[in-house]
Image (spheres, helix red, strand yellow):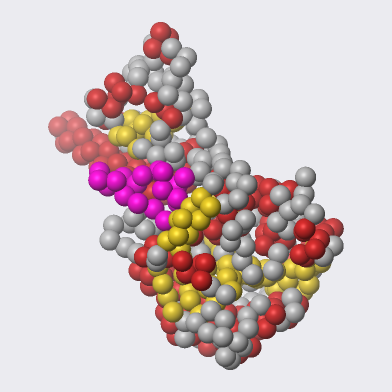
Amino acid sequence: MRNAHIAEKFGEKSTVALIKRDTVAGSPGKYTQDAVNEVKAMLKEGADYLGGMKKFVKPGNSVLLKVNSVYPVPPEAAWNVDPRLVEALIGLIKDEVPDVGRIIVADDSAAVKQVPDIDTVDVMVENGIAAAARKAGAEVICLEYDSHVRTTIPDARTFPYFECPKALLDADVIITVPKWKNHIEGHMTLGVKNAQGYYTRVLKQDGMTDHRNDKERRHANDIHLKFTDTLKVIYPNLTIIDGLWAIQGDGPGVARDWEVIRDMNMIVMSNDIVAADSVAAQASGYAWDWVPTTRLAWRQGFGHAKPEEIDIKGADLNKVMVKFVPPKLYDIQGYFDNVDVYTHGGCVTGCQPLLRMTLNFPDEAGTLKKLKEPINFVVGNNTYIPPDLKPERTCLLGECLWNNWLDLEAEGSQTPQNLKDRGALVIPGCPSFANIFTNIPPWIDSIAARDQAELEAAAAAAV
């Protein structure tokens, strides 16, 4: 049942600004001040529909912009928030509230502890956010280096506590700035899911990440409840969804050029994070409740989401809608050349979709076609493992595949332990997206290189 306080907080309807331009000057990695001014005008239009930036930011306030800075790729990849928007937003805040206090641009990037020797500011340097923020006069910080406070979530459904960065707790105003993207696990990653950057990650001695850390705790079939639980303690004052460029297909990080939409030219803004996410999903051609975090947050009373509950200001939703190609989610069996996947109980929002997104990269690069015979992935509990799988070409993925109670050995199945003992690649985690992304691509590369060397040697011997 929805909480009664929703109408008290937002009224019978929530206002969402949907700002659209036919063109926006420049690109995420190459732009002039004119481009920043264009984006600033878009942001001002949106803020004015909501009562103006002064409604959210007061003189002397410390403002934390929680940007989506997921990975160290160039700005043109569009995986991260557009530097044009970052620079424009900081400029707008300073224009509208000249006596504002500190403006901090922050995240705890998914790349930390996944890419060696890198922190969130390094990620922001690579993707252009750091330069944009500093040029506009903001500070740039790594939330992973911040002091953390054990924060209890009242009435938690799955995530009873997490180590919250003190910067979030100390900020007078939190503006969450997600990238407008599809997501292989969450359908889309928008405002509610941008909380993933609050959580931190630790490494074990073997270099693999410990799946019990906050970033990877509850990151399987319970991922959506994790984010709605977090709303109970951190509810951003303003949500600004960056759709200048957007990501369709198998986001959040994509391998194929067509997955980047370079003429989206939209921004969504609201103080109701749920309504903002609903409008962004609808503007992407999806139903308002297609994104699990949106419908859960709506049912739990965190905001409005149904079309009749939202007053859209600015562009006409039906006229500017761009119908995204949806993510394939857990569709991995029989999809890739030279890849066999065996699963019984693998999570549909855990290892399976993460594996699919990871395999897109060697597939697009042509590496999978260089394999002389299939590689194998075993995922999930109670999975029958054919007895002829070769350990050197087999990956054992996730924690639950070790849990088998159906006596599959009586049917002729190999055991995971037998394959491990004979050299299979073991990827721990429940799930561990860092371990998957970090270890599987080089493993495939090494097998492909070995296969090619053997084929070349055989061809030379035959001459």
**Nearer to the camera, 44 or 173:** 173
Whether residue 98 is visible:
yes
- Where, quadrant-wise, is the C terminus in this rendering? top left
Question: Where does the N terminus fall, quadrant-wise?
Answer: top right
Horizontal relation, residue 288 to residue 155: left or right: right
In the depicted structure, whether residue 41 falls above or below residue 29: below
Residue 212 covered by magenta stretch: yes
Of 142 and 183, nearer the camera is: 142
Horizontal side, residue 103 vs residue 325: left or right: left
Q: Residue at x 40, y 33 (%)?
A: 399
Res 55 quadrant in image = bottom right
* Residue under the image location 44 percent in, 38 percent down: 430
Residue at figure coordinates x 76%, y 64% from the top left: 9
Q: Position of residue 404 (x, y in %)?
A: 43, 20
Q: Residue 224: x and y, percent?
A: 59, 47
| Image location of residue 117, percent across then percent down | 28, 61
Range shown magenta: 200-217
